[in-house]
Image (spheres, rainbow, N blue to C red):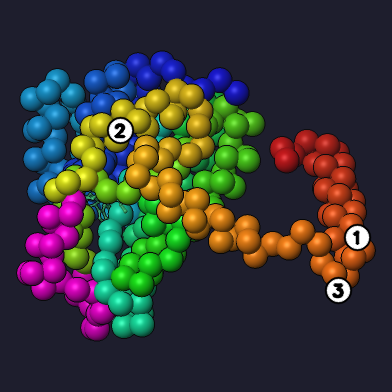
Amino acid sequence: MDAVKDFEGRVAFITGGASGAGLGQARVFGRAGVRVAIADVRADALAGAVDDLAREGVEAFPVVLDITDRAAYARAADEVEAHFGDPITLLFNTAGVNGFGSIETMTYDDFDWILGVNLGGVVNGLRTIVPRMIAAGRGGHVTSVASVGGFEGSRMTGPYSAAKAAVISLMESFALALPAHGIGVTVLCPASIRSNISEAHLTRAAADASGVLTDDAFVESLREVYAHGMDPEHLALHLKRAIERDELYAIPYPEVRDDLERTFGRILDAVPDTDELDLEGAEQRLRALARFRESARARADATGAVT
Ligand code: NAI
């Protein structure tokens, strides 16, 4: 599979394109000649983003969309393809929300909102647009924005970390399937972005009960953290390079290496070299798995399916 290197003329669908990381992507890929559609749940922010981009010479097509709404997602994709007269071949699942609060106080509403946008919204993006990309047969690239938070648990952002872990896993799975269709896959895992995510709760429908902290002092302390996050354009340039190199993981934050080493080290430490209670067990399991893989491959060869 050839990685996407020439972006000129391709059509991109960028969720969360009105702000932060998504707006940075619209700038960087727009300047590279991509025809960008920016989708966002906030119509006012979209209008502002379109104006900002136009001043910089990037003509973006705005779509008001709540990514948790599947029927609206399909309509939005139709609208974008009709507007540009070409299929979407670059998908950026960037929209996301975060909610801080102690894991033991998070409510069903909190889980539904945070998992709904960060995981459900990504699933909807993949299910709506990937089949169109495959059918169009013009290759392309699919990016989802997860988080380094997806590699470990967090007392204060439990549902968010769980959603991001699932997104990482999903992209690992798509990366096994999409190259056969000429489509690359990247999961971008940022640590901190200069963005408006401290105000994510403002996009949320009223909740009956919530453990998410939204008092002014707390939101202000979050704003201060994100004010020092990576410039979204800078992050989008890292992403562009990862796409050009067809890299599955983009984690352009040197400061997270030690934490990741500790996390993965802890996981590997749980795996024994041998199982002294069942010395033959591992061999038998591996042989059974190899037989299963062999028969699955034979079945796929017979039906012409891609494995
Ligand atoms: P942001 O708040 O500046 O931008 C996110 C955009 O998504 C907003 O414009 C918002 O209106 C939109 N959005 C929220 N819910 C939506 C929905 N249901 N449908 C459509 N659009 C919706 O935040 P940021 O930081 O740029 O976030 C982008 C991605 O980066 C998210 O997936 C976030 O989880 C991820 N991320 C952010 C980090 C940070 O430090 N800000 C760190 C790691 C990951």
Q: Which residue is mark 1?
A: 284
- Give the amino acid type for the residue marked by disc 1 in the picture: Gln
Inter-mark Cα distance, 1 to 3:
14 Å
The x, y position of residue 302, in whole percent, is 85, 39
Q: Which residue is mark 3?
A: 277
The mark lying in front, picked from 1 and 3, is 3
Q: Is residue 258 left or right of residue 41?
A: right
* Quarter where residue 225 is shown: bottom left
Seen at 26% across and 69% down, the residue is 100
Seen at 73% across and 40% down, the residue is 307
Tell me, yes or no, if residue 128 can be seen here.
Answer: no
- Point out the tag, 1 or 2, that comes first from the N-terminus: 2
Inter-mark Cα distance, 3 to 2:
50 Å
**For the residue labelled by badge 3, is the local secondary structure a helix, a strand or a loop?**
loop
**For the residue labelled by badge 1, is the local secondary structure a helix, a strand or a loop?**
helix
How packed mark 2 is, by other alpha carbons closer than 10 Å (few <14, some 14-19, many 20 or more), is many
Seen at 35% across and 77% down, the residue is 103
- Point out the tag, 1 or 3, that comes first from the N-terminus: 3
Q: Are marks 3 and 2 in contact (CB under 8 Å)?
A: no
Q: Which residue is mark 2?
A: 236
The x, y position of residue 219, in whole percent, is 13, 65
Magenta stretch in the rendered image: 205-226
162 to 38, vertically: above or below: below
- Give the amino acid type for the residue marked by disc 2 in the picture: Ala
The mark lying in front, picked from 1 and 2, is 1
